[in-house]
Image (spheres, helix red, strand yellow):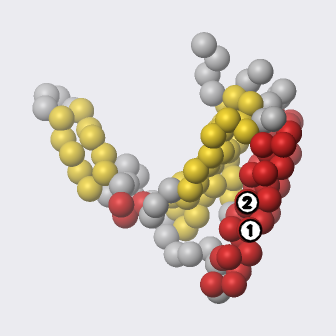
Amino acid sequence: MPQYLLSVHNGEESPYSSEEEMQQAFADTGRVNEEMQAAGVWVFAGGLMPASTASVVRVKDGPLHHTDGPYLEAKEHIGGFWILEVADEAEARAWAEKGAVACRGDVEIRPFQSI
């Protein structure tokens, strides 16, 4: 069965208008997580710390370079992700729709390369 990465994208600012909305989004996402696990499609998932906590190891013309900050300097970053094992892209899309509503953010669907 193919695996898909569903990545949640957020802007630099919080996507939530209030603490209450944030807590509701966390609860909604928890319910989607439980539904994925019950359906047997869940492989792994996790929320990420803000992009400002990232660092990058670069290799270019010689020694490795370490830099602070995200790989791309962009207004949007990955805030979290799911790895699912589903029958096809249509099923991945259906889960991404549920995830986008729960997280209140855009969800990118990307298949893993087959081995």
Residue 18 drawn above or below residue 101: below
Can you tell which mark lies on residue 97?
none
Residue 36 coordinates in the image, percent (x, y): 80, 45
Element type at mark 2: helix
Q: Which residue type does callout 2 highlight?
A: Gly
Element type at mark 1: helix
Could you say which quadrant of the image residue 60 lies in? top left
Which residue in the structure is indicated by mark 2? 30
- Do residues under tags 2 and 1 come within 8 Å of each other at their CB atoms? yes
Residue 53 coordinates in the image, percent (x, y): 36, 60
Could you say which quadrant of the image residue 79 lies in? bottom right
Q: Which residue type does callout 1 highlight?
A: Ala
Classify the position of the C terminus by image quarter.
top right
Residue 75 drawn above or below residue 93: below
Residue 105 coordinates in the image, percent (x, y): 68, 63
Residue 64 coordinates in the image, percent (x, y): 18, 35
Q: Residue at x 37, y 49 (%)?
A: 71
Q: Is residue 104 at least partly visible in the picture?
A: no
Q: CA distance from mark 2 to mark 1?
A: 5 Å
Label 2: few (<14), some (14–19) or many (≥20) C-alpha neighbours in 10 Å: some
Q: Residue at x 75, y 52 (%)?
A: 33
Can you tell which mark lies on residue 27?
1
Q: Residue at x 83, y 49 (%)?
A: 35
36 to the left or right of 6: right
Judged from this view, the residue extending furthest toward the top is: 115
